[in-house]
Amino acid sequence: MLRSQTKLFALGKRQLCRSMSKSCDLTLVEVDDKTGIATLTMNKPPVNSCNLEMMRALKDSMKQIEGNKSRGIILTSSNNKVFSSGLDLNELRNPEQERLVAFWKELQEMWLTLYLSNLPTAAAINGHALAVGCVMASACEYRVMLPGFTIGIHATKFGYVVPPFIVNSYLSVLPRPVVERALLQGKIFSTDEAQQINLIDEVANSKEEALSKCASFIGSFAEANPVARALTKRQLRAEFARTLLDEPEAELKESLEYITSPLFQDSLDAYLAKLKSKNKK
Ligand SMILES: CC/C=C\C/C=C\CCC/C=C/CC(=O)SCCNC(=O)CCNC(=O)[C@H](O)C(C)(C)COP(=O)(O)OP(=O)(O)OC[C@H]1O[C@@H](n2cnc3c(N)ncnc32)[C@H](O)[C@@H]1OP(=O)(O)O
């Protein structure tokens, strides 16, 4: 198994830290010395799918940013077409038990770290954000998206039951009737549609503009006491994180049973075959 490592480099006025796998830097972190805002860039070609190492790298980077006393986190992608394609489906297909347990625990921890981050968080969504890609964006406090892309949780479309904490991710940004319809339909929203239902807060015409709008949002907390802000955020968000905070093992057990069931494996095989065949045509 690859182990992600983190390195810190001094780069002019900026600090750059990287979470590395054997072949590439999975995440890149740049801290703007003037604003104190950290940009956390997902950098796992080709489509930022979240395998075990990627989620560990994201979690470690977020913890490192919090430890460095940054003023906020902007989550974005180095790929200008895909923000994230969600969970790496190869991790779910005929999984080896030990790795699947580690993978699902990492998903739980990565989501909790982002959702309950002490810092203001914003997503500059510069490409498609599907399934857990959408979940990560929804876990942030603010979302700015570029036109011409899609965002949503389409699990039910290809035969997946949506885990409760993923439902809660949506519920923390969208009204319940909208969540219910979107999840049951497996609806993927265009940028315009996402703005109409307030799944995203703003549209930007370039990645630079998106980053700048996210930075303005984070800057809007300049007058707030960081500790009071963080504790208030935690109180507001604790309810939706309750299952994973109190009973992560129960959630893990339920998810593992479901993922390893023939029902799930069969629909995953069919979905992966469809995904691969797209590129063979
Ligand atoms: C009781 C129940 C309790 C619990 C339930 C427990 C578990 C349920 C699990 C359900 C959870 C789901 C959450 C998820 O996140 S699942 C992931 C869903 N994601 C997708 O469906 C995205 C699929 N990808 C795409 O639509 C496109 O790739 C995308 C629009 C993102 C980009 O398109 P583009 O044309 O730019 O690239 P492609 O050529 O399609 O892709 C390049 C190669 O990457 C492969 N790929 C893409 N996405 C994934 C992925 N998520 N995982 C693995 N691999 C992926 C794709 O096949 C291409 O591969 P090659 O053909 O080049 O080999």
Image: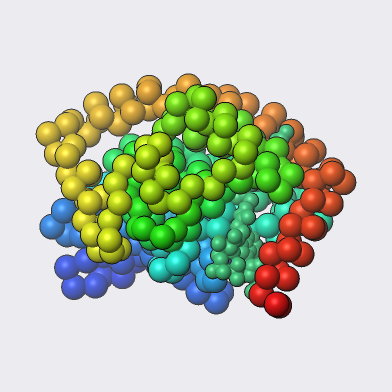
Give whichever of 19, 169 is nearer the camera.
169
Q: Residue at x 79, y 57 (%)?
A: 270
Residue 141 seen in this snapshot? yes
Q: In this view of the protein, which residue sits in the foreground, 188 or 81?
A: 188
**Whereabouts is ligand 1, in terms of quadrant?**
bottom right
Residue 227, located in which quarter of the rendered image? top left
Asked whether 222 or 220 is in front, the reply is 220
Q: The C terminus is located in which quarter? A: bottom right
Quadrant of residue 11 within the rendered picture: bottom left
Residue 52 position within the rendered picture, expressed as x and y whole percent measured from the top left: 61, 56
Q: Can residue 21 be seen in this snapshot?
A: no
| Residue at point 69%, 29% (across, down) | 250
* Residue 62 in picture, x, y percent from top left: 40, 50
Query: Would residue 14 appear left or right of 49 to someone viewing this image?
Result: left
Q: Position of residue 29 (x, y in %)?
A: 34, 62
Q: Is residue 209 above or below residue 122?
A: below
